[in-house]
Amino acid sequence: EDQVTQSPEALRLQEGESSSLNCSYTVSGLRGLFWYRQDPGKGPEFLFTLYSAGEEKEKERLKATLTKKESFLHITAPKPEDSATYLCAGGFQAGTALIFGKGTTLSVSS
Amino acid sequence: GAVVSQHPSWVICKSGTSVKIECRSLDFQATTMFWYRQFPKQSLMLMATSNEGSKATYEQGVEKDKFLINHASLTLSTLTVTSAHPEDSSFYICSAGLSAGYGYTFGSGTRLTVV
């Protein structure tokens, strides 16, 4: 069965304490690996799409990387406003739905 | 660009009544719309996929007679929860596949509470 697995389930960081979130996938036919941020009571907010192993993308304090089996979301010097749930999803051919992992809930305290 | 507007953002209804949730693509044509359900502290679970002008495809275990999906135009898809019960209380989110390029955009979600 195709799966997208995220770890850890929850992560607590102090402000400025860098860390990484993991997303491993066993899906076949993957076209793109997506990262989203979700705040409580809101829909997912798009962060990155990665298409091939070795690809990296950055946005402010976030950097996403992709290998053949997993993706990492690196958070550098996080701030309290980075607190959210980060979702990873596998994408396939256009017109088919994303397969989501369970997410990592990040809490950053000042 | 590529915004999906979802309404209402929250709704409370009585058990046995029906509730309609709307998703409109504001600046693009949504050929395909996906409907997800999310329980507290859980991830998004796909309920159904709808293509404009055709019947929706439901995931295993999703009652198609309870969750009616209409995608009559390229800019509007609706989910109607019929004869709602407390166990239908959840967060419902729509998502559209982008017509240009490869990507997905999400609505802001609807919190349904059935009392």
Image (cartoon, rainbow, N blue to C red):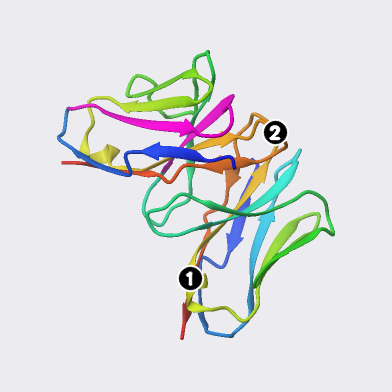
Residue A89 lies within the magenta run: no
* Mark 2 crowdedness (10 Å alpha carbons): few <14, some 14-19, many ≥20: few
Q: Is residue B101 above or below residue A49?
A: above
Q: Nearer the viewer, residue B94 or A7?
A: B94
Q: Nearer the viewer, residue A44 or B38?
A: A44
Secondary structure of the residue carrying tag 2 is loop
- x, y percent for residue A78: 57, 78
Please, what is the dominant secondary structure of the magenta stretch? strand
Which residue appears farthest toward the right when viewing the image? Answer: A54
**What's the residue at 46%, 25% (across, down)?**
B76
The kind of residue on which mark 2 rests is: Ala
Tag 1, which chain?
A
Q: Is residue B23 visible?
A: yes
Q: Nearer the viewer, residue A11 or B92?
A: B92
Q: Nearer the viewer, residue B12 or B39?
A: B12
- x, y percent for residue A71: 71, 60
**What's the residue at 53%, 79% (across, down)?**
A79
Question: In the drawing, what numbered circle is on residue B100?
Answer: 2
Q: Which residues are magenta?
A: B17-37
Q: Is residue B112 visible?
A: no
